[in-house]
Amino acid sequence: MLSLLRRQLFKSPIVRNQILQQCCISNVQVPFQDDLSAADNDDFNLGDFQHYKESDDIIAMKLELANPTFHNDKEKVVPKPIEAQKENSPFCNELSEVVGIKEPMVFVSKLTNPYLNLAVEDYIYNQMPKPEDPSTNYNRLMFYINSPCVVIGKNQNPWKEVNLPLLNSLHIPLIRRRSGGGTVVHDQGNVNYSFMTTKERFDRFTFANIIKDAVNASNQSKYQLEVNDRGDITTTTQEDGINYKISGSAYKLSKGKSYHHGTMLLNSRLDILGKLLSRDETKLGVVDATNSISSVKSKVTNLEIDSQTFIDAITSGFKESYGLAEEINRGELSLEEQEALEQNELLGLGDFIEANSNSRFARVVTVDDATVLPDAVNQMADELKSWGWRYGGTPKFTHQLSNDKFGFKVKFIVGKGAILEGFELEFIGNESKLISEKKITESFKYLEAFIKNNKLEYTGSNVAGFITNDFISDWVGESIDGTI
Amino acid sequence: MFRSVLRTSTVRAAFAPRIATFSTSRIIANSISHKVSKGSHVYKYLEEGPKSVKYTAEHEWLASFADESGFVGITQYASEALGDVTFVELPEVGDRVEIGDTIGSVESVKSASEIYSPVAGEIVAVNTALESEPSLINTDPIGEGWIAHIKYDDASAVEASEELLSEEDYDASLEEH
């Protein structure tokens, strides 16, 4: 297996591509990036942007224009996925074969499905070997970029943190992660990093500082960064006196292991981010969830560098801190691999490669659509997708909706597993009521009877379905999550 | 900072297994107690007090009682390393657990930390006070901050377990770092 990997390492364009101009298909081409104004959000079915993808032909053409040298004969013999050709890392055929390697490693996921990415992250974390002694490390670093989604912390309440009606109208998925902390919005202008190490070496500052130093040293970003005493990565103080947050981080500690992962706002749609996380309590109701974790609102901004530049800079930082010092032993290389190296030397590229590579080494593995994922990953992704985890994982809470027009309030009492346990009606003294108190009470009778003997998951359509008055029913469903 | 203070110590226990210590916040602890606090529900559960208190490499404590049950929580060391606890996820009464199963988690300063069962048995009570007052884990970790009460499947196996550390061994393993 090892020799297979090594062969890939050298057969793949790793050596050559370091010399070639890097050609990035960045998210700059996606309409989500530039072309939509704030007014589009609600009116123009913005949900579609998440399905937007340039066709393979266009990507191929761009690559060719940018770098025709990719299409030499050798490349044609072994066709690779088009995106593969711009990568300087070996592609991973079977994830299960590489996750246990006892070396520091970097994983770059080209997947965009958020459930899959979180499941792959979990899998890499679970399979990370434990070092036998404190002087070695098998640390992992993973990068992934998700299609638009909202990600809440392990112990958060989505009804409280997220504008669910807006989220649902845009068909943006809500995801509950396994680490703590607050709610973040992902889109293709945001790169997620995940740094995994032992529990012993865990702290909130080490990797934040590596990111800060790497970005500052790159001189590519709009801002210089600093790390505050909470471990947050922010800009230095700007003219308006504000340190803008550009990264939201969260942590998980388990048996002998820990990770620090976070978002990095590079070119995100901050206006949409803000809208998805703000809710008007007069319309969407007051959620009392004192037992769950509340998000801390911060002023945010984009770093404004492209994702590949960011990933390269942080990868270098990781290699410097944790990479292997020793050179790859040539004696272990196959004939073919040695030839590849010699060819580079013949062409006088050896020095160039050396000057451009890190003094320390860490394997970089790319995970993409062609990578075979183990069953465990698909099972984890299914679990992350389940209603029981995403919504059912909410600690118990109450949700009070108030309607002046109808002249009443209803407070839903939601128990463990986000099962509706009961509700309270309260009438507001109002002379000109559209519906009489008696009729309002009657319209909730069926719901009351049903939840006595059945477990009703707290969704707008579930609850609305048992309210017999259409006006009240629609309003309740709209307010809970926009489903009726 | 915390770690480096502890690392300067040269005390070493001969047989204590190596314990991974971790520090998620910058605290300097002058003294760490591993004793069950006297006034707590745990201590007073049976008149004669706990039969034994043992510790795990993952920084849980287990106070065993004569009725073949025990209380589980996290140690003061863990509680200080994690920082202010803002949420505690509890197991369900009636759940069956094996050694090493996750029985809940503690959230503090954006980190979710898993808690593992040091014994096999059945959860007979959970500390619901932690739902409204998670900070009990910080103020009285080995006492009012208990997490679960477990009825043992096999009390003699708990007694004989080599994974469970005595107070001296646990303390020595912390000093090692």
Image (tube, coloured by chain):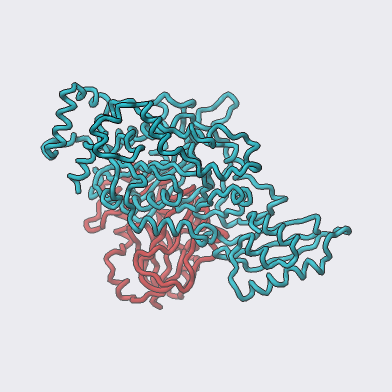
Q: Is residue A366 left or right of residue A431?
A: left
Quarter of the image that includes the N terminus of chain B: top left
Indicate left or right for A246 with A110 as reference: right
Q: Name the residue nearer the viewer: A419 or B17.
A: A419
**Vertical arrangement, residue A215 with respect to residue B69, above or below:** above
Q: Nearer the viewer, residue A364 or B177?
A: A364
- In the rendering, at what x and y percent does residue B30 appear? 41, 48
Q: Is residue A153 above or below residue B5?
A: below
Residue at left 66%, top 59%?
Answer: A484
**Residue drawn at point x = 34 percent, y = 26 percent:** A67
Q: Is residue A280 above or below residue B90?
A: above
Residue at 48%, 51% in the rendered image? A180
Identify whether A77 is placed above or below B52.
above
- The residue furthest bottom is B67
Task: Identify the residue at the far right of this view.
Answer: A431
Residue A393, position as x, y percentages in the image: 52, 60
**Residue B81 showing in the rendered view:** no
Task: Give residue B50's position: percent from left, percent from top.
Answer: 40, 71
Q: Is residue A212 visible?
A: yes
* Residue located at (24% from left, 37% from top): A77
**Number of numbered discs:** 0
Colour of the chain lettered B: red
Residue A62 location, quadrant: top left
The x and y percentages for residue A74 are 23, 33
Using the image as rendered, state which of residue B166 and residue B164 is in the foreground. B164
Colour of chain A as rendered: cyan
